[in-house]
Amino acid sequence: MRYAIRPMRLEDVPQANEIDRECFPTQWPPPSYKRELLFNHLSHHLVAWEVGENPDELIEQREQKGSRPGRFLARVRRLFYADEASPSNQRIVGLVGLRIMGDVAYLTTIGVREAYRRQGIGELLLISAIDLALMRNARVATLEVRASNSAAQALYEKYGFTKTGARQGYYSDNREDAVIMTTDTITSAPFQSQFQRLNRAHAERWGPAQCQID
Ligand SMILES: CC(C)(COP(=O)(O)OP(=O)(O)OC[C@H]1O[C@@H](n2cnc3c(N)ncnc32)[C@H](O)[C@@H]1OP(=O)(O)O)[C@@H](O)C(=O)NCCC(=O)NCCS
Protein backbone atom coordinates (compact mmCIF):
# COMPACT_ATOMS: atom_id res chain seq x y z
CA MET A 1 0.00 0.00 0.00
CA ARG A 2 1.20 3.53 -0.73
CA TYR A 3 0.11 4.75 2.71
CA ALA A 4 1.33 4.08 6.22
CA ILE A 5 0.06 4.82 9.71
CA ARG A 6 1.86 6.47 12.60
CA PRO A 7 0.94 8.56 15.67
CA MET A 8 0.23 12.23 15.01
CA ARG A 9 2.97 14.66 16.01
CA LEU A 10 2.97 18.40 16.63
CA GLU A 11 4.47 19.07 13.22
CA ASP A 12 1.39 17.43 11.66
CA VAL A 13 -1.07 19.89 13.22
CA PRO A 14 -1.25 22.30 10.23
CA GLN A 15 -2.04 19.41 7.87
CA ALA A 16 -4.50 17.93 10.40
CA ASN A 17 -6.30 21.29 10.43
CA GLU A 18 -6.39 21.29 6.62
CA ILE A 19 -7.96 17.83 6.60
CA ASP A 20 -10.46 18.87 9.23
CA ARG A 21 -11.49 21.92 7.22
CA GLU A 22 -11.97 19.74 4.15
CA CYS A 23 -13.88 16.97 5.97
CA PHE A 24 -15.96 19.05 8.39
CA PRO A 25 -16.28 22.51 6.78
CA THR A 26 -19.31 23.47 8.88
CA GLN A 27 -17.60 22.59 12.14
CA TRP A 28 -14.73 25.04 11.82
CA PRO A 29 -12.63 25.76 13.86
CA PRO A 30 -11.54 22.19 14.60
CA PRO A 31 -10.64 20.86 18.02
CA SER A 32 -7.17 21.97 19.07
CA TYR A 33 -4.98 19.08 18.02
CA LYS A 34 -2.03 20.77 19.67
CA ARG A 35 -3.77 20.86 23.04
CA GLU A 36 -4.99 17.27 22.65
CA LEU A 37 -1.49 16.05 21.78
CA LEU A 38 0.20 17.90 24.60
CA PHE A 39 -2.24 17.67 27.46
CA ASN A 40 -4.88 15.01 26.96
CA HIS A 41 -3.38 11.66 27.89
CA LEU A 42 -6.71 9.95 27.21
CA SER A 43 -6.70 10.95 23.57
CA HIS A 44 -4.76 9.30 20.76
CA HIS A 45 -4.42 10.45 17.18
CA LEU A 46 -3.04 8.52 14.24
CA VAL A 47 -2.30 9.81 10.76
CA ALA A 48 -2.12 8.11 7.39
CA TRP A 49 0.76 9.45 5.33
CA GLU A 50 1.68 8.97 1.72
CA VAL A 51 4.70 6.76 1.26
CA GLY A 52 4.51 7.37 -2.48
CA GLU A 53 7.44 6.21 -4.55
CA ASN A 54 9.73 6.22 -1.55
CA PRO A 55 9.11 3.03 0.40
CA ASP A 56 12.51 3.54 2.05
CA GLU A 57 10.85 6.26 4.07
CA LEU A 58 8.78 3.68 5.87
CA ILE A 59 9.12 3.73 9.58
CA GLU A 60 10.21 0.44 11.06
CA GLN A 61 7.42 -0.96 13.16
CA ARG A 62 8.68 -0.81 16.70
CA GLU A 63 7.15 -2.86 19.43
CA GLN A 64 6.56 -0.86 22.55
CA LYS A 65 7.04 -3.47 25.23
CA GLY A 66 8.27 -1.00 27.83
CA SER A 67 6.69 -0.02 31.10
CA ARG A 68 4.00 2.67 31.28
CA PRO A 69 6.51 5.43 32.23
CA GLY A 70 8.67 4.24 29.32
CA ARG A 71 5.73 4.52 26.97
CA PHE A 72 4.89 7.97 28.32
CA LEU A 73 8.42 9.24 27.73
CA ALA A 74 8.43 7.71 24.27
CA ARG A 75 5.21 9.58 23.51
CA VAL A 76 6.63 12.91 24.71
CA ARG A 77 9.83 12.38 22.72
CA ARG A 78 7.87 11.52 19.60
CA LEU A 79 5.71 14.64 19.93
CA PHE A 80 8.70 16.95 19.98
CA TYR A 81 11.38 15.28 17.92
CA ALA A 82 10.75 14.07 14.42
CA ASP A 83 13.12 11.17 13.83
CA GLU A 84 15.19 10.90 10.67
CA ALA A 85 12.90 8.31 9.16
CA SER A 86 9.89 10.60 9.32
CA PRO A 87 10.67 14.00 7.84
CA SER A 88 8.28 16.86 8.37
CA ASN A 89 7.47 17.07 4.67
CA GLN A 90 5.42 13.89 4.70
CA ARG A 91 2.03 14.34 3.11
CA ILE A 92 -0.68 13.49 5.63
CA VAL A 93 -3.76 12.17 3.85
CA GLY A 94 -6.04 11.15 6.70
CA LEU A 95 -6.39 11.02 10.46
CA VAL A 96 -8.30 9.27 13.20
CA GLY A 97 -8.83 10.25 16.84
CA LEU A 98 -9.68 8.06 19.79
CA ARG A 99 -10.40 8.86 23.40
CA ILE A 100 -10.05 5.88 25.70
CA MET A 101 -11.92 6.15 28.98
CA GLY A 102 -11.99 3.03 31.11
CA ASP A 103 -12.82 0.16 28.82
CA VAL A 104 -14.58 2.31 26.21
CA ALA A 105 -12.85 3.70 23.13
CA TYR A 106 -14.65 6.74 21.67
CA LEU A 107 -13.84 7.38 18.06
CA THR A 108 -13.75 11.19 18.12
CA THR A 109 -12.85 11.84 14.48
CA ILE A 110 -11.89 10.18 11.24
CA GLY A 111 -11.27 11.87 7.93
CA VAL A 112 -9.48 11.40 4.62
CA ARG A 113 -8.58 14.15 2.15
CA GLU A 114 -11.19 14.19 -0.59
CA ALA A 115 -8.75 13.40 -3.40
CA TYR A 116 -7.57 10.28 -1.57
CA ARG A 117 -10.92 8.70 -0.72
CA ARG A 118 -12.08 5.24 -1.86
CA GLN A 119 -8.55 3.84 -1.73
CA GLY A 120 -8.87 1.96 1.55
CA ILE A 121 -7.33 4.70 3.71
CA GLY A 122 -10.40 5.25 5.90
CA GLU A 123 -10.53 1.53 6.47
CA LEU A 124 -6.83 1.37 7.33
CA LEU A 125 -7.32 4.20 9.84
CA LEU A 126 -10.28 2.41 11.43
CA ILE A 127 -8.37 -0.89 11.62
CA SER A 128 -5.48 0.94 13.30
CA ALA A 129 -7.83 2.70 15.73
CA ILE A 130 -9.39 -0.63 16.75
CA ASP A 131 -5.91 -2.15 17.14
CA LEU A 132 -4.95 0.78 19.37
CA ALA A 133 -8.15 0.39 21.41
CA LEU A 134 -7.33 -3.30 21.89
CA MET A 135 -3.77 -2.47 22.89
CA ARG A 136 -5.13 -0.03 25.50
CA ASN A 137 -7.49 -2.67 26.93
CA ALA A 138 -10.74 -1.17 25.66
CA ARG A 139 -13.63 -3.61 25.40
CA VAL A 140 -15.98 -1.67 23.13
CA ALA A 141 -15.67 1.10 20.59
CA THR A 142 -18.37 3.71 20.07
CA LEU A 143 -18.94 6.91 18.09
CA GLU A 144 -21.47 9.45 16.86
CA VAL A 145 -22.10 10.03 13.19
CA ARG A 146 -24.44 12.34 11.29
CA ALA A 147 -27.68 10.63 10.35
CA SER A 148 -27.06 11.67 6.71
CA ASN A 149 -23.45 10.41 6.55
CA SER A 150 -24.05 7.17 4.71
CA ALA A 151 -20.40 6.73 3.59
CA ALA A 152 -19.08 6.78 7.16
CA GLN A 153 -21.93 4.62 8.41
CA ALA A 154 -21.16 2.03 5.73
CA LEU A 155 -17.53 1.97 6.86
CA TYR A 156 -18.51 1.50 10.50
CA GLU A 157 -21.09 -1.18 9.70
CA LYS A 158 -18.47 -3.07 7.72
CA TYR A 159 -16.42 -3.21 10.94
CA GLY A 160 -19.24 -4.45 13.16
CA PHE A 161 -20.58 -1.17 14.55
CA THR A 162 -24.35 -1.20 14.92
CA LYS A 163 -26.81 1.58 15.66
CA THR A 164 -27.37 1.67 19.38
CA GLY A 165 -28.97 5.06 19.91
CA ALA A 166 -29.49 8.60 18.66
CA ARG A 167 -28.98 12.16 19.84
CA GLN A 168 -31.58 14.53 18.52
CA GLY A 169 -30.32 17.81 17.07
CA TYR A 170 -26.78 16.95 18.16
CA TYR A 171 -24.90 18.93 15.50
CA SER A 172 -25.03 22.65 16.18
CA ASP A 173 -24.56 23.80 12.55
CA ASN A 174 -27.83 22.35 11.19
CA ARG A 175 -29.40 20.63 14.24
CA GLU A 176 -28.93 17.28 12.51
CA ASP A 177 -29.39 14.13 14.60
CA ALA A 178 -26.44 11.95 15.52
CA VAL A 179 -26.60 8.19 15.27
CA ILE A 180 -24.68 6.38 18.01
CA MET A 181 -22.87 3.30 16.72
CA THR A 182 -21.15 0.77 18.95
CA THR A 183 -19.29 -2.50 18.53
CA ASP A 184 -19.79 -5.75 20.39
CA THR A 185 -16.96 -6.66 22.73
CA ILE A 186 -13.87 -6.17 20.60
CA THR A 187 -11.94 -8.85 22.43
CA SER A 188 -14.66 -11.48 21.86
CA ALA A 189 -13.94 -14.40 19.55
CA PRO A 190 -16.68 -13.52 17.02
CA PHE A 191 -15.54 -9.88 16.74
CA GLN A 192 -11.89 -10.90 16.50
CA SER A 193 -12.48 -13.48 13.79
CA GLN A 194 -14.47 -10.99 11.69
CA PHE A 195 -11.90 -8.23 12.36
CA GLN A 196 -8.97 -10.45 11.34
CA ARG A 197 -10.86 -11.53 8.22
CA LEU A 198 -11.46 -7.90 7.22
CA ASN A 199 -7.85 -7.05 8.01
CA ARG A 200 -6.62 -9.79 5.67
CA ALA A 201 -9.11 -8.79 2.97
CA HIS A 202 -7.91 -5.17 3.20
CA ALA A 203 -4.26 -6.25 2.84
CA GLU A 204 -5.09 -8.47 -0.13
CA ARG A 205 -7.05 -5.75 -1.88
CA TRP A 206 -4.81 -2.75 -1.21
CA GLY A 207 -1.48 -4.34 -0.30
CA PRO A 208 0.11 -4.63 3.12
CA ALA A 209 0.56 -1.38 5.03
CA GLN A 210 3.06 -0.37 7.67
CA CYS A 211 1.17 0.55 10.83
CA GLN A 212 2.95 2.05 13.82
CA ILE A 213 0.20 2.76 16.31
CA ASP A 214 1.96 3.37 19.62
C1 LIG B 1 -15.80 8.25 5.80
C2 LIG B 1 -14.41 8.36 5.18
C3 LIG B 1 -13.38 8.52 6.30
C4 LIG B 1 -14.11 7.04 4.40
O1 LIG B 1 -12.77 7.10 3.95
P1 LIG B 1 -12.29 6.36 2.61
O2 LIG B 1 -10.81 6.34 2.63
O3 LIG B 1 -12.93 6.96 1.41
O4 LIG B 1 -12.90 4.90 2.83
P2 LIG B 1 -12.37 3.52 2.23
O5 LIG B 1 -11.91 3.68 0.83
O6 LIG B 1 -11.41 2.93 3.20
O7 LIG B 1 -13.71 2.66 2.22
C5 LIG B 1 -13.96 1.69 3.22
C6 LIG B 1 -15.44 1.38 3.29
O8 LIG B 1 -16.18 2.55 3.67
C7 LIG B 1 -17.42 2.57 2.99
N1 LIG B 1 -17.47 3.75 2.13
C8 LIG B 1 -16.49 4.68 1.98
N2 LIG B 1 -16.92 5.65 1.16
C9 LIG B 1 -18.15 5.35 0.79
C10 LIG B 1 -19.11 5.99 -0.05
N3 LIG B 1 -18.85 7.15 -0.67
N4 LIG B 1 -20.32 5.41 -0.20
C11 LIG B 1 -20.61 4.25 0.42
N5 LIG B 1 -19.73 3.57 1.22
C12 LIG B 1 -18.54 4.13 1.40
C13 LIG B 1 -17.52 1.27 2.21
O9 LIG B 1 -18.09 0.31 3.07
C14 LIG B 1 -16.04 0.96 1.98
O10 LIG B 1 -15.83 -0.41 1.81
P3 LIG B 1 -15.81 -1.01 0.29
O11 LIG B 1 -14.64 -0.36 -0.40
O12 LIG B 1 -15.62 -2.48 0.52
O13 LIG B 1 -17.14 -0.63 -0.33
C15 LIG B 1 -14.33 9.53 4.15
O14 LIG B 1 -15.44 9.45 3.28
C16 LIG B 1 -14.31 10.92 4.79
O15 LIG B 1 -13.25 11.42 5.18
N6 LIG B 1 -15.49 11.57 4.88
C17 LIG B 1 -15.56 12.94 5.44
C18 LIG B 1 -15.34 12.94 6.93
C19 LIG B 1 -16.37 12.10 7.65
O16 LIG B 1 -17.55 12.11 7.31
N7 LIG B 1 -15.93 11.38 8.72
C20 LIG B 1 -16.80 10.58 9.54
C21 LIG B 1 -17.23 11.36 10.71
S1 LIG B 1 -18.26 10.38 11.79
Image: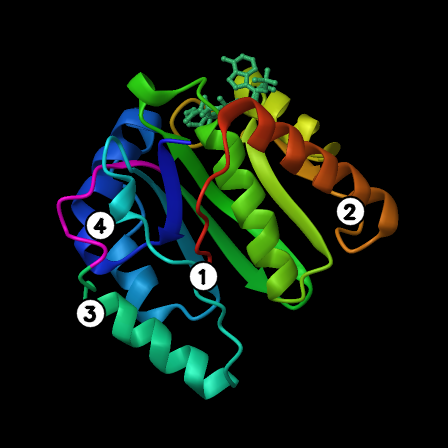
Label 2: element kind: helix
Residue matched to label 4: 12
Q: Report whether residue 38 is seen.
A: yes
Residue matched to label 3: 80
Q: CA distance from mark 3 to mark 1?
A: 17 Å
Check whether the beta carbons of the residues at disc 3 and disc 4 lie within 8 A of each other: no
Residue 29 forms part of the magenta stretch: no
As drawn, 159 above or below 133: above
Q: In which quadrant of the rendered view does residue 118 lie?
A: top left
Residue matched to label 1: 43
Residue type marked 1 = Ser
As drawn, 104 above or below 28: below
Residue matched to label 2: 192
- Which is in the foreground here, disc 1 or disc 4? 4
How many residues crowd mark 3 within 10 Å: few (<14), some (14–19), many (20+)?
Answer: few
Q: Earlier in the sequence, mark 4 or mark 2?
A: 4
Give whichever of 81, 172 is nearer the camera.
Answer: 81
Residue type marked 4 = Asp
Label 1: element kind: strand
Magenta range: 85-94
